[in-house]
Image (cartoon, helix red, strand yellow):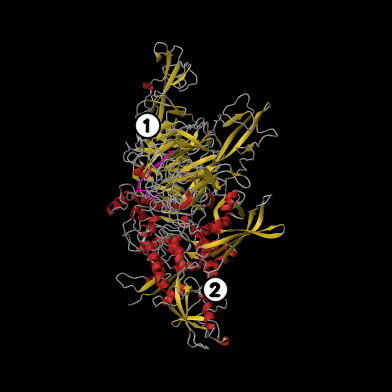
């Protein structure tokens, strides 16, 4: 999860932020004044200043916020002046918008506010619908308005050209005041809340901002989006009463608190109407004390009543924004903030500390306990001095008195929790109100011997320690928390209270253990004791109050709306361990571990001693006999097999795997499938060392995997087997994968030369290229390549021969390869222990709602008998209902509800419908007289969580990435890496090296239109494809000028729109939207743009050019023994300097492959026979260059 | 830097060179040659001494043969302790090969359990695994396993199949990441100074503050005498699998990586050698 910020305001109006990866509150130093409230999104933070105006802080990003303004210059021809600005009276303005209706001279464009600046001056656009125009950029026509062409004809009477200018938002990372509009608002603001970014699919930036004025009116900020972060205007929202506070969730929930304590809920919030339509009133939790504060998330509502009690609203979702009932929660708070993933923060009523709700998960939205965030503040020492303790103690003495009265009065542990120390008790599950624990506890310091029985033990423990240990250590600012664990339901063993002090435990020689007798444990109860060292803070409550109060941060407001954490996040907020030096901090596990621990002294010691031990005990005794002889190991199981003969169906088989040591010491094995054929027992077998790939094919009905050998790859017909359970399938897969690797002597992480590929399921495979893979004329056949799986889930991956590997997920998240291997289902031994991280991906599942028009009732879901299903997939052949459609495999879980998808190609009407004359036909986004059917697409998001050797590179989502391919003996240390953001911006990554493959930051490269594909060649040639299908070449890219200087427009092949490009050492290939593969002819160092596109092949989906100019593709329609195979890895044979386009295709693994990259394989093949016998050594840097295509100048630098 | 799983291999493939000699009191037909063998540290004596038995039976008459047992320098060796533990505890500072005397008479019923067949070893081994899992996961993992999975663990040990054993054993080593470790660490501490065979008590891998417990923490709690006080000579060695891990080693890591196949962390505290 990327790092994000929790924002808070203290009672003095200072704004602090706490990073989800950080340990201390950072003061926002450049704040122009004190703030009252803040509300944060992930990309910005809004605040309400003490002057009651609104401030906006847009976080700096590598992607600038820029906006293109354009206007058209129009001219008409007359016989005297030729083309001139003298137009006919009936004509449009000389300067106008694209329609000609709006008068728009250049000087009429003003910056919207002082937070903006112009990026440059106006210039003429010389790109007309993907084609370059003449120098001046004019397009010609007979008359206005009409269609324009870039060529001047005899009848061209008018012409126009487009002027472009960019403005850029400059007030990044500072608080910029939102200018008050001319019709200035009647009264000052008193509350502010932003959210709503999830109600439309629009890429990040759209926000709903709601504010409340002192008079109780509510205003909505119109027009906030990515390129207009400030929004445009305030719109008043009519109200049923006077509002005191409002909260807007990330989705479509908006709740507000009325002055009299009732709550109102906004209804009718949709994509088209983010402001909503009406209010509904919800009674407050307790009628006698009204609500004072409310906070909403995605599917939760938390409220605080005037007596500071906390309430949780049950059953809230976007269909039922009002929810169904209130549940009382533990704790007394003054305000609550619900953040991303429905996580909850609050400010305590008594101590004004910020609390985080622990244990909030999607299945348990109300969480488990409150835990105080005890991070020190910026510039503050984590420990107080004695004098400040005393003064703070005096300051708070009045409160201490009052507190003890309260706790005497009702002996309530909850009450006693105030100030410094909190008891968190196990909360009953949802549905029953919390009963306060009834143990008279807090101040009963009599018994000295702890009894392992009940809550009273806590106090005894406390008092015991109190008397035994006078306070002598320096105390931390953190309040102590006593925490009780939940008693397990099975009653097998009862866990007891754990005295937990959130204290720093450094500066001690070693922990001092309490001497409570652990023999008690055998009676069935276990006592976990905290260290008593420096536990003196848990002395008596009076003392704790004094301690807790010393320079205790008093918070007034917290905002977690932009803070992306969840219950599994590792947070460092809870103990002031910032200066703890203990090596024992690291937490280890088999599958996940923390890198610094890898180098810990204790670990080194164990490694060294173990090898010393084997030297001592074994080296001299190798001639001794082994006690146990090696034998064959057999694993068997019942499986189903997709039988080879027709009719194909699943039949029950016995599946057996025999492993033995081969003659060369490598382990080998055989797979047997025993089946019955006409009552006769038969079997099928495969040698493990002949298996080329194992492919998991998990779908919602069967747990299957496919086993390929080179023969079966040729036939496109694998052995398909199905296990009874998912677990069994992964057990087999893990075992067989390890055996396959062992039999081939492959272990550890993929090499730098490795070829990476990705299937349509997002599974990642990697193959070690043999040296002869690119040999001419006898390369290693493609179907003999061995592929092994690497954990993780990606849509595409790119690499180079320096071992830099980047991937992009389905949700456009960028990932960098960490150097590990395994992850996913490769547990334990088949996986590296470090460098494996959690990886998540999100994608949408689409179904279609189809309707037919009839004269009586219009469009209905009653179709003709011949029609498709009224709920179907895209082709209409399969029925897909909302309830019946399941996530693609058990790994995916739904994370949203079905919603109409408006982002379909061909546009839609306001309700998402597309119309056509009949099924199947091409649909359009408006209704005509001839349209008798319509459809709309529904989308539902699902999420997958897995592990793999990948680390996220936040925050910019990407659609394409490329890294400089280099020779095997490259001396480059930083590698150019280019990418395209999901919005189409071109980005250049700085600081990418073999040591830091993630690089440091992005450099934005301006373009006039969004791009979709990019590739960089070995000499730094950058080629890219724009959304309109035309190609661009970036000029003057060099190590000194990594971003180059300008784009050269390259027309695409006639009538084709290009979609992807790949650049090798010198060759450039591109794929168009109709599946044609094109080779760029005539590229020379002096003319790097080349001259023309040459057709190479059709049925190509994707191309990857390597550093040897090798050409690999993903092809469709490859013939197999049974059927055509889609998504097949193919290798171009016969690619030579004199014949860079090659001769024919060699077919490799296929059937659902989506992506391949060969850009890491810079291994020159051994040259054979043809030249001379002496010349067998692999040629290195002196390899001959293609005739006529000498390497461009930059090569010397890069390779 | 080597990978953690290499530790598992090193532990599994630890071997002790051993010289078996027949007790001179046994009646033989001719002189018995000593027998040399590499014993797996993680296995049990009855599983690896078939060859020894065969070797010595060649020189003996059948009627003189009773149940075989082993002894090192006068101490009968308990077959139900892993071989590595026996070696570390009784013989770690002696000269290699480890010399073991083989007896076929006078079975010391007081000191040793009888072991008529290897199924006794299997029963003992499986009950140890179950006990360890009761501590680690409230028995949830081991109970979720099928009979054949149990068999796989046992067969893996019996046939010295690392992959076979660990394919199953890794499940016993899993734990929810948010808990930072097992419920309790299954360990046994063997001391020369103690009458009890070993110490085994409940001990959590993570302190209540959330800090990982170390080997030091465990020893401090269980046998503080074994720890070296300030300014004092090392009196004891803390030996696991023939090595002395640093006391700051996290206990959870030790349990995952240096446990014996029975899933217990066997810790020997032996007097430091005095030179």
Q: Residues within 10 Å of mark 1 (few under 14, many from 20)?
A: some
Q: Does the magenta stretch include residue A415?
A: no
Measuring from the top left, give residue A371's x and y in whole percent.
43, 51
Residue A168 is tagged as 1
In this view, which residue lies farthest toward the left? A387
Q: Tell me, yes or no, if residue A983 can be seen here.
A: no
Secondary structure type for disc 2: helix
Magenta segment, which residues? Answer: A968-980
Q: Residues within 10 Å of mark 2 (few under 14, many from 20)?
A: many
Look at 55% across and 60% down and name the residue there. A490
Chain of the residue where label 2 is placed in the rendered structure: B
Task: Give left or right: position of A357 versus A323.
Answer: left
In this view, which residue lies farthest toward the right? A679
Secondary structure type for disc 1: strand
Measuring from the top left, give residue A529's x and y in whole percent.
42, 62
Residue A388 to residue A304: above or below: below
Viewer-side residue, A30 vs A1160? A1160
Residue A662 is tagged as none
Chain of the residue where label 1 is placed in the rendered structure: A
Measuring from the top left, give residue A862's x and y in whole percent.
68, 33
Distance of mark 2 from mark 1, alpha carbons?
77 Å
Viewer-side residue, B96 vs B109? B96
Viewer-side residue, A839 vs A210? A839
Residue B236 to residue A75: above or below: below
Task: Give left or right: position of A394 versus A705.
Answer: left
* Main secondary structure of the magenta stretch: loop
Mark 2, residue position = B121
Q: Tell me, yes or no, if residue A635 can be seen here.
A: yes
In the figure, residue A749 lies in which quadrant? Answer: bottom left
């Amino acid at each position: 999860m990327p790092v994000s910020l929790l924002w808070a305001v203290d009672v003095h109006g200072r704004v602090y932020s706490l990073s989800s990866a950080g340990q201390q509150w950072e003061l926002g130093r450049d704040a122009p004044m004190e703030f009252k409230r803040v509300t944060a999104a992930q990309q910005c933070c809004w605040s309400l200043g003490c002057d009651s105006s609104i401030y906006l802080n847009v976080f700096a990003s590598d992607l600038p916020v820029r906006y293109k303004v354009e206007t058209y210059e129009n001219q008409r021809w007359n016989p005297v002046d030729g083309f001139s600005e003298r137009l006919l009276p009936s004509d449009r303005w000389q300067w106008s918008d694209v329609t000609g209706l709006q008068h728009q001279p250049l000087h009429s464009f003003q910056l919207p506010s002082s937070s903006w600046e112009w990026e440059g001056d106006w210039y003429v656009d010389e790109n007309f619908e993907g084609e370059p125009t003449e120098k001046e950029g004019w397009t010609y026509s007979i008359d206005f308005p009409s269609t324009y062409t870039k060529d001047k004809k005899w009848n061209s009477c008018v012409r126009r050209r487009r002027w472009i200018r960019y403005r850029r938002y400059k007030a990044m990372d500072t608080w910029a005041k939102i200018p008050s509009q001319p019709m200035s608002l009647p009264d000052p603001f008193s509350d502010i809340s932003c959210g709503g970014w999830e109600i439309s699919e629009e890429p990040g930036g759209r926000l709903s901002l709601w504010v409340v004025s002192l008079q109780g009116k509510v205003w909505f900020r119109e027009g906030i989006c990515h390129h207009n972060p400030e929004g445009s205007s305030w719109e008043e929202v009519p109200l049923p009463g006077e509002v005191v506070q409002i909260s807007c969730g990330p989705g479509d929930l908006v709740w507000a608190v009325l002055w009299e304590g009732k709550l109102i809920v906004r209804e009718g919030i949709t994509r088209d109407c983010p402001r909503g339509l009406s209010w509904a009133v919800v009674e407050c939790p307790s009628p006698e004390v009204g609500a004072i504060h409310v906070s909403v998330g995605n599917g939760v509502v938390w409220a605080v009543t005037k007596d500071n009690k906390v309430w949780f609203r049950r059953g809230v979702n976007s269909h039922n924004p009002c929810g169904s009932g209130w549940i009382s929660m533990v704790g007394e708070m003054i305000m609550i903030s619900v953040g991303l993933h429905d996580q909850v923060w609050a400010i305590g009523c008594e101590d004004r500390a910020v609390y985080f709700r622990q244990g909030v998960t999607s299945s348990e939205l109300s969480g488990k306990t409150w835990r105080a965030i005890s991070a020190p503040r910026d510039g503050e020492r984590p420990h107080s001095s004695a004098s400040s303790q005393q003064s703070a103690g005096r300051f708070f003495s009045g409160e201490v008195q009052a507190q003890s009265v309260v706790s005497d009065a009702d002996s309530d542990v909850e009450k006693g929790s105030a100030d410094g120390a909190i008891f968190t008790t196990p909360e009953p599950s949802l549905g029953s109100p919390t009963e306060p624990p009834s143990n008279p506890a807090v101040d009963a310091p009599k018994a000295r011997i702890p009894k392992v029985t009940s809550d009273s033990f806590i106090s005894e423990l406390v008092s015991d320690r109190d008397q035994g240990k006078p306070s002598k250590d320096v105390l931390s600012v953190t309040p102590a928390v006593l925490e009780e664990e939940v008693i397990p339901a099975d009653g097998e063993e009862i866990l007891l209270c754990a005295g937990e002090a959130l204290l720093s435990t450094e500066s001690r020689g070693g922990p001092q253990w309490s001497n409570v007798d652990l023999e008690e444990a055998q009676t069935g109860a276990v006592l976990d004791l905290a260290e008593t060292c420096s536990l003196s803070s848990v002395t008596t409550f009076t003392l704790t109050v004094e301690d807790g109060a010393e320079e205790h941060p008093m918070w007034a407001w917290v905002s977690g709306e932009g803070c992306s954490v969840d219950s599994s996040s590792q947070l460092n907020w809870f103990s002031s361990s910032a200066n703890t030096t203990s090596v024992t901090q690291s937490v280890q596990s088999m599958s996940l571990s923390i890198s610094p621990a890898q180098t810990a002294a204790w670990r080194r010691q164990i490694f060294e001693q173990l090898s010393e031990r084997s030297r001592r005990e074994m080296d001299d005794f190798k001639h001794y006999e082994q006690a146990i002889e090696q034998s064959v190991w057999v694993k068997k199981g019942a499986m189903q097999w997709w039988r080879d003969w027709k009719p194909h169906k699943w039949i029950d088989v016995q599946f057996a795997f025999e492993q033995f040591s081969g003659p060369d010491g490598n382990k080998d094995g055989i797979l047997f499938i025993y089946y019955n054929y006409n009552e006769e027992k038969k079997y099928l077998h495969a040698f493990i060392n002949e298996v080329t790939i194992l492919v998991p094919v998990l779908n919602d009905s069967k747990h299957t995997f496919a086993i390929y050998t080179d023969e079966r790859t040729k036939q496109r017909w694998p052995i398909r087997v199905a296990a009874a359970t998912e677990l069994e399938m992964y057990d087999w897969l893990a075992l067989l994968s390890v055996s396959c690797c062992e039999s081939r002597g492959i272990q550890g992480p993929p090499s730098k030369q490795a070829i990476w590929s990705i299937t349509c399921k997002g599974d990642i495979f990697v193959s070690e290229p043999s040296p002869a893979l690119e040999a001419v004329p006898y390369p290693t056949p493609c179907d003999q390549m061995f592929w092994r799986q690497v954990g993780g889930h990606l849509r595409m991956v790119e690499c180079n021969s320096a071992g830099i590997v980047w991937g992009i997920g389905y949700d456009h998240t960028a990932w960098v390869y960490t150097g590990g291997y395994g992850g996913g289902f490769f547990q334990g031994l088949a996986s590296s222990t470090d460098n494996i991280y959690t990886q998540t991906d999100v994608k949408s599942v689409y179904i279609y709602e189809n309707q037919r028009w009839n004269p009586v009732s219009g469009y209905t879901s009653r179709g003709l008998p011949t029609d498709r299903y009224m709920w179907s997939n895209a082709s209409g052949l399969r029925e897909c209902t909302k309830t019946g459609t399941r996530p693609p495999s058990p790994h995916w879980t739904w994370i949203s509800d079905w919603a109409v998808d408006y982002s379909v190609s061909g546009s839609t009407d306001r309700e998402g419908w597309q119309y056509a004359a009949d099924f199947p036909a091409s649909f359009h986004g408006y209704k005509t007289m001839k349209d008798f059917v319509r459809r709309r697409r529904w989308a539902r998001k699902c999420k997958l969580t897995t592990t793999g050797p990948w680390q996220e590179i936040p925050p910019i989502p990407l659609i394409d990435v490329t890294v400089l391919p280099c020779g095997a003996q490259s001396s480059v240390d930083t590698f150019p890496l280019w990418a395209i953001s999901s919005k189409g911006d071109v980005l250049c990554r700085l600081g990418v090296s073999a040591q830091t493959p993630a690089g440091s930051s992005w450099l934005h490269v301006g373009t006039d239109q969004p791009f979709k594909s990019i590739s960089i060649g070995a000499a730094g040639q950058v080629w890219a494809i724009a959304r309109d299908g035309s190609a661009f070449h970036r000029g003057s890219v060099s190590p000194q000028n990594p971003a180059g200087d300008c784009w050269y427009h390259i027309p695409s092949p006639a009538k084709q729109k290009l979609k992807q490009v790949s650049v090798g050492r010198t060759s450039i290939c591109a794929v168009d939207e109709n599946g044609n593969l094109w080779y760029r002819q005539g590229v020379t160092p002096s003319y790097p743009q080349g001259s023309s596109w040459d057709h190479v092949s059709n049925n190509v989906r994707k191309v990857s050019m390597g550093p040897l100019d090798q050409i690999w593709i993903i092809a469709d329609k490859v013939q197999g023994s049974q059927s055509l195979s889609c998504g097949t890895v193919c290798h171009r044979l016969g690619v030579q300097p004199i014949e860079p386009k090659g001769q024919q295709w060699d077919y490799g693994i296929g059937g659902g492959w989506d992506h391949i990259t060969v850009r890491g394989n810079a291994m020159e093949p051994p040259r054979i026979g043809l030249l001379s016998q002496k010349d067998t050594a692999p040629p290195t840097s002196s390899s001959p260059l293609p005739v006529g295509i000498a390497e461009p100048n930059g090569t010397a630098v890069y390779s | 830097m080597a990978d953690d799983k290499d530790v598992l291999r090193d532990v599994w493939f630890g071997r002790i060179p051993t010289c078996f000699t027949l007790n001179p009191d046994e009646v033989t037909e001719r002189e018995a040659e000593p027998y040399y063998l590499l014993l797996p540290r993680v296995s049990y004596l009855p599983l690896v001494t078939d060859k020894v038995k065969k070797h010595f039976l060649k020189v003996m008459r059948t009627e003189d043969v009773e149940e075989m047992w082993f002894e090192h320098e006068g101490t009968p060796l308990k077959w139900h302790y892993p071989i590595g533990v026996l070696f570390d505890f009784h013989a770690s500072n002696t000269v290699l090969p480890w010399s073991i005397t083989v007896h076929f008479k006078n079975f010391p019923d007081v000191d040793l359990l009888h072991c008529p067949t290897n199924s006794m070893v299997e029963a003992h081994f499986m009950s140890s695994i179950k006990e360890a899992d009761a501590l680690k996961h409230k028995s949830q993992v081991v109970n979720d396993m099928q009979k054949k999975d149990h068999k796989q663990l046992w067969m893996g040990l019996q046939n010295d199949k690392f992959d076979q054993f660990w394919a199953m054993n890794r499940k016993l080593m899993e734990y929810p990441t948010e808990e930072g470790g097992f419920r309790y660490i299954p360990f046994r501490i063997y001391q020369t100074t103690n009458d009890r065979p070993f110490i085994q008590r409940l001990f959590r891998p993570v302190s209540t503050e959330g800090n990982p417990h170390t080997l030091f923490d465990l020893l401090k709690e269980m046998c503080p005498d074994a720890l070296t006080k300030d300014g004092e000579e090392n009196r004891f060695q803390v030996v696991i699998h023939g090595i002395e891990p640093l006391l700051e080693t996290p206990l959870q890591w030790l349990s995952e990586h240096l446990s014996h196949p029975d899933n217990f962390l066997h810790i020997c505290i032996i007097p430091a050698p005095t030179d």
